[in-house]
Amino acid sequence: MWKYTIEVNGMMCGMCESHVNDAVRKACPVKKVRSSRAKCQTVVISEAELDPELIAAAIRGTGYDVGMIQKEPFQKRWLFG
């Protein structure tokens, strides 16, 4: 699995976060996507490697600015007890 952390500027409210999340879901096969206006970022979890430019284009298409994109392997952590 892969984790992409995308810098997104211009989100001002919860609806902005939802628009970004929906755009990413429509453009890419993701397991999870979460945006935060406070952190100015969107985090995408995917089983397969994704094209970062495809993610960026989907977000830009909603009217937000995309900055740096970081990609790293992702391993789900289970919490017990």
Image (cartoon, rainbow, N blue to C red):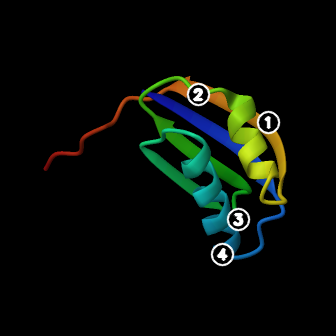
Three-letter residue code for mark 1: Met
Q: Residues within 10 Å of mark 3 (few under 14, many from 20)?
A: some
Q: Secondary structure at mark 3?
A: loop
Q: Which residue is mark 2?
A: 50
Cα distance between the residues tagged 2 and 3: 23 Å
Nearest to N terminus: mark 1 or mark 2: 2
Residue at 69% of width from left, 30% of height from top?
52
Q: Residue furthest left?
A: 81
Nearest to N terminus: mark 1 or mark 4: 4
Three-letter residue code for mark 4: Met
Q: Residues within 10 Å of mark 1 (few under 14, many from 20)?
A: few
In this figure, what is the number of numbered marks? 4
Q: Left of 11 or right of it: where is 19?
A: left
Where is residue 71 shown, x and y percent of the image?
62, 27
Q: Which residue is mark 3?
A: 37
Residue 68 is labelled as 1
Three-letter residue code for mark 2: Leu
Three-letter residue code for mark 3: Arg
Name the foreground residue: 41 vs 47: 47
Mark closer to the observer (4, 3): 4
Quarter of the image where one finds residue 16: bottom right
Cα distance between the residues tagged 4 and 2: 25 Å
Residue at 80% of width from left, 53% of height from top?
61
Q: Which residue is mark 4?
A: 15
Q: Are marks 3 and 1 in contact (CB under 8 Å)?
A: no
Q: Are marks 4 and 2 in contact (CB under 8 Å)?
A: no
Cα distance between the residues tagged 3 and 1: 15 Å
Cα distance between the residues tagged 1 and 4: 22 Å
